[in-house]
Image (tube, helix red, strand yellow):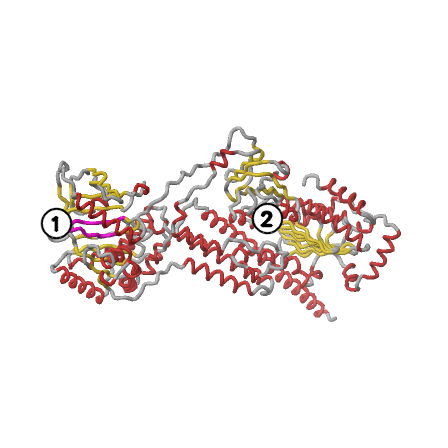
């Protein structure tokens, strides 16, 4: 090789080394990004579940924002997994989009507004035309056209007109942008935003054609009434006077002239964004795009008396009484509550006036001679009631008729004109609730009972009572009795199979944003995690009471605590926003993919966002475990000099070693998991080949001859370790057996895990299987989930804190040294048990 060719060759080798490191760093970055994003998504899901408890108020903006953040996070998780695996799981995006479309359909708050005329007369409307004329006007038309009750003549300025008005002035997106940013807890911000929106609306132009149609409808109204009448211009939003009353949230104007109708129309529309109206609909779960304002224009009735009646007593519905409140003049004073009205109580069955209570009224409202209202003083000593008994009975009959028609109690506004004619102005659903016991806060401590444990983290609030069932192995789940308290060392999604039977769940270790915590909330099982000591303190069959709200566990049955914890109805759960959350959370939080070893653990079985994140989290660990086999990084690694009888090459792809090394000692190791494993390895006296009986020696020779050539070639290779500061993938070759330890150690316990793989050995199959049994039993004692098949072990430990993960890695380092060539010595089960007990007694006393 020429002089310059020599340096070119060295440069190419250097370039290949740097390219490989770049590729591996990139892959590792995808891995870390997936873990970080997955944790963020799980935290958001936990917050969503907390809101679903009904104990916290939230608005539609919170719901939309949180679900959007979850959706974006899940997509990032998928894309990081596919970037790591060269698009191996591409079908996940299709499944994700299908779930997302279902969620968006549930969240979609867009109302279909039919294309209609700008104005429509009452005669063509009814209760089914709410999306056209709004609740108030449609219900009034129903009373007029279907029940034949007297109402003022009038017409509707339709919802379609509202949409045309806003779009004509480019207001829809402008209003939406302002409303979405409003923090309803900040009153100043709420009022300022409200003023800004209302000013935009009032300063906007109404299309000329729309103005002509409104004026023409007014002229037709005058012909119908036979006079040039003033009118009332009243709000009639789509959700107004429905299940959500929106009572008093919007503006209406009385005694309006023809020339003022257009201006008053804009002011009614603007009232859709009054501060109180915005607060109301946001806390009820509506979006601004659902807020559509039709407007009713009605003949103005100059009232002699007016008021409101309930077709049923809302506080004592069993009494079957009609309540009528009345004042002299316009009934607005009753609605506003500014005077004490006359009260009439009528028996619904006999129509007998049970009671009349005289009000106190020193003023009344009447129509001014030209426009608007006039307040006049009257003597509150006037003994005359505002209604005659005949009018009271007449009103009561109307109330019964309206209630029977709607099938629900009604809140009805009415008026009596100067000629004693009664008109119904409005009817809406009257809210009546059964009396429920008031919600009582759980006491933090109950005196007179022994407290066994008073620490931990709440995953699901509540109180549970039962006998303790300490779970030592997953196989014991099938033995779990009805009504017992599940006590386990750590969390596991597989516990879902007993959640319908468990009265409570307690673990030593666990995260409230983990998969099992999510399941416990979904199944509403009181759950305490991170008690640290439950499996040590609690005894099988012991009766306990679990207060998961305060993280206290009592000995015995605490009756008063159980009674206190009975659930009461939460009114917030009846709102639209809560019901929307109830629908969408089913597509986000439930976990159906529980067992990674199941044949059903496939992308096509993902039904929720949680399923997708669970699948991706499991697959990314599997991919990281096997990914390094695709590359040939050994030529770019450096030797480890650590005083252990195995050759190890280390490849650092990010912060795992000090820089500029040609070989590494334990002091040069910055990787947290490798440091822990080496502490274990270097603390042990590595065994000499154990004594082998003649039979064992012959079997070992026979087995060696049967090993395929390619496996024999692997035997001669060095062990190899890929590291970063928090990550390690350590392939250990010791004679005829192979093991791999992969681990991630960080601050977030949701990320932390250890995967352990073991295969092979030089002895005959029965001795290799005994070593597998020994290692498996030790791993189970350490808390691993262990799967075995012949002489192969596949084990995993997840979601422990840094200190616990490091401690277990150190033990694995010791176990690696302890079991080197041990299979040759395990000539019977008794010897195997002796070695097992020896290791446990020496190294697992604290576990």
Q: Which residue sits furthest top?
A: 448
Q: In this view, does 213 lie above or below 50?
A: below
Q: How many marks?
A: 2
Q: Residue at x 79, y 43 (%)?
A: 834
Of the residues under marks 1 and 2, which one precedes in the sequence?
Answer: 1
Query: Is residue 325 positioned above or below 220 on the image?
Result: above
Q: Is mark 2 on a helix, strand or loop?
A: helix
Residue 672 at x, y percent in the picture: 64, 48
Q: Looking at this view, is 501 or 834 the one in front?
A: 501
Mark toward the viewer: 1 or 2: 1
Tell me the magenta residue range.
411-426
Q: Are marks 1 and 2 in contact (CB under 8 Å)?
A: no
Q: Residue 495 carries which label?
A: 2
Q: Within 10 Å of the Cα at label 1, are there few (<14), some (14-19), or many (20+) other Cα atoms?
A: few
| Residue 657 showing in the rendered view | no
Q: Position of residue 550 (x, y in %)?
A: 51, 37
**Residue denoted by label 1:** 418
Q: Which quadrant is the C terminus positioned in?
A: top right
Q: Is the magenta stretch mostly helix, strand or loop?
A: strand
Q: How far apart are marks 1 and 2 (CA)?
A: 74 Å
Front-most of residues 426 and 447: 426
Q: In this view, does 374 lie to the left or right of 799?
A: left
653 lies above or below 479: below
Of residues 217 and 453, the one drawn nearer to the viewer in this rendering = 217
- From the viewer's perspective, tell me whether residue 668 is left or right of residue 503: right
């Amino acid at each position: 090789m020429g002089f310059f060719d020599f340096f070119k060759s060295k440069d190419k080798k250097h370039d290949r080394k740097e390219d490989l490191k770049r590729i591996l760093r990139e892959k590792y970055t995808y891995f870390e990004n997936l873990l970080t994003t997955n944790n963020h998504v799980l935290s958001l899901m936990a917050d969503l579940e907390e809101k679903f408890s009904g104990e916290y108020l939230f608005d539609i903006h919170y719901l939309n924002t949180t679900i959007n953040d979850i959706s974006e996070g899940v997509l990032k998780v998928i894309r990081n997994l596919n970037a790591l695996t060269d698009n191996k799981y591409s079908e996940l995006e299709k499944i994700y989009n299908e779930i997302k479309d279902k969620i968006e359909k549930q969240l979609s708050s867009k109302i279909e507004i039919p294309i209609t005329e700008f104005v429509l007369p009452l005669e063509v409307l009814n209760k089914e035309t709410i999306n056209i004329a709004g609740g108030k006007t449609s219900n009034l038309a129903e009373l007029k056209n279907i029940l034949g009750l007297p109402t003022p003549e009038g017409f509707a300025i339709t919802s379609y007109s509202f949409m045309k008005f806003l779009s004509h002035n480019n207001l829809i997106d402008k209003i939406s942008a302002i409303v979405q940013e409003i923090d309803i807890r900040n009153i100043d911000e709420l009022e300022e935003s409200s003023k800004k929106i209302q000013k935009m609306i009032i300063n906007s132009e109404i299309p000329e054609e729309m103005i002509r149609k409104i004026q023409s409808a007014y002229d037709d109204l005058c012909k119908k009434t036979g006079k040039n009448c003033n009118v009332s211009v009243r709000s009639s939003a789509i959700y107004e006077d429905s299940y959500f009353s929106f009572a008093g949230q919007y503006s209406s104007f009385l005694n309006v002239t023809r020339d003022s109708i257009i201006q008053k129309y804009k002011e009614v529309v603007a009232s859709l964004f009054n501060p109180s109206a915005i607060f109301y609909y946001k806390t009820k779960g509506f979006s601004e795009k659902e807020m559509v304002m039709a407007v009713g224009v009605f003949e103005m009735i100059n009232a002699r008396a007016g008021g409101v009646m309930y077709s049923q007593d809302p506080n004592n519905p069993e009494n079957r009484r009609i309540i009528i409140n009345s004042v002299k003049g316009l009934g607005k004073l009753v609605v506003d509550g500014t005077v004490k009205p006359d009260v009439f109580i009528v028996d619904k069955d006999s129509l007998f006036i049970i009671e009349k209570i005289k009000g106190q009224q020193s003023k009344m409202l009447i129509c001014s001679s030209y426009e608007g209202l006039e307040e006049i003083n009257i003597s509150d000593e006037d003994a005359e009631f505002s209604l005659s008994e005949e009018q009271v009975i007449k009103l009561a009959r109307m109330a019964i008729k309206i209630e029977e028609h709607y099938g629900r109690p009604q809140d009805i506004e009415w008026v009596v004109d100067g000629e004693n004619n009664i008109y119904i102005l409005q009817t809406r659903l009257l809210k009546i609730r059964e009396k429920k016991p008031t919600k009582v806060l759980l006491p933090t401590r109950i005196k007179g009972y022994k407290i066994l444990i008073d620490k931990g983290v709440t995953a699901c609030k509540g109180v549970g009572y039962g006998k303790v069932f300490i779970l030592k192995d997953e196989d014991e789940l099938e033995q779990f009795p009805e009504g017992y308290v599940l006590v386990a060392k750590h969390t596991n999604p597989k516990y879902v199979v007993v959640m319908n039977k468990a009265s409570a769940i307690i673990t030593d270790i666990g995260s409230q944003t983990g998969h099992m915590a999510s399941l416990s909330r979904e199944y509403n099982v009181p759950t305490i995690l991170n008690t640290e000591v439950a499996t040590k303190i609690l005894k099988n069959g012991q009766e306990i009471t679990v207060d998961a709200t305060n993280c206290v566990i009592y000995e015995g049955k605490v009756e008063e605590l159980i009674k206190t914890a009975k659930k009461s109805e939460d009114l917030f759960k009846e709102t639209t926003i809560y019901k929307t959350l109830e629908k969408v959370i089913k597509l986000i939080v439930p976990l159906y993919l529980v067992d990674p070893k199941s044949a059903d653990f496939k992308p096509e079985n993902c039904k929720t966002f949680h399923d997708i994140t669970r699948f991706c989290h499991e697959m990314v660990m599997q991919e990281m475990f096997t990914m390094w086999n695709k590359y040939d990084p050994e030529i770019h690694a450096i030797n480890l000099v650590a005083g252990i009888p195995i050759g190890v090459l280390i490849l650092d792809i990010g912060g795992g070693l000090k820089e500029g090394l040609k070989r590494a000692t334990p002091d040069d190791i910055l990787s947290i998991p490798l440091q822990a494993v080496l502490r274990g390895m270097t603390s042990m006296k590595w065994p000499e080949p154990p004594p082998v009986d003649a039979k064992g020696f012959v079997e070992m020779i026979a087995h060696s001859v049967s090993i395929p050539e390619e496996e024999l070639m692997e035997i001669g290779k060095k062990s190899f370790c890929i590291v970063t500061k928090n990550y390690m993938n350590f392939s250990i070759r010791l004679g005829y057996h192979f093991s791999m330890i992969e681990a991630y150690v960080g601050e977030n316990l949701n990320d932390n895990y250890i995967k352990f793989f073991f295969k092979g050995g030089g002895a005959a199959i029965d001795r290799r299987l005994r070593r597998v049994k020994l290692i498996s039993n030790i791993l189970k004692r350490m808390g691993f989930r262990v799967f075995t098949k012949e002489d192969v072990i596949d084990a995993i430990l997840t979601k422990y804190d840094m200190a616990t993960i490091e401690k277990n890695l150190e033990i694995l380092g010791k176990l690696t040294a302890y079991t080197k060539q041990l299979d040759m010595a395990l000539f019977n089960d008794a010897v195997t048990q002796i070695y097992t007990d020896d290791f446990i007694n020496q190294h697992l006393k604290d576990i």
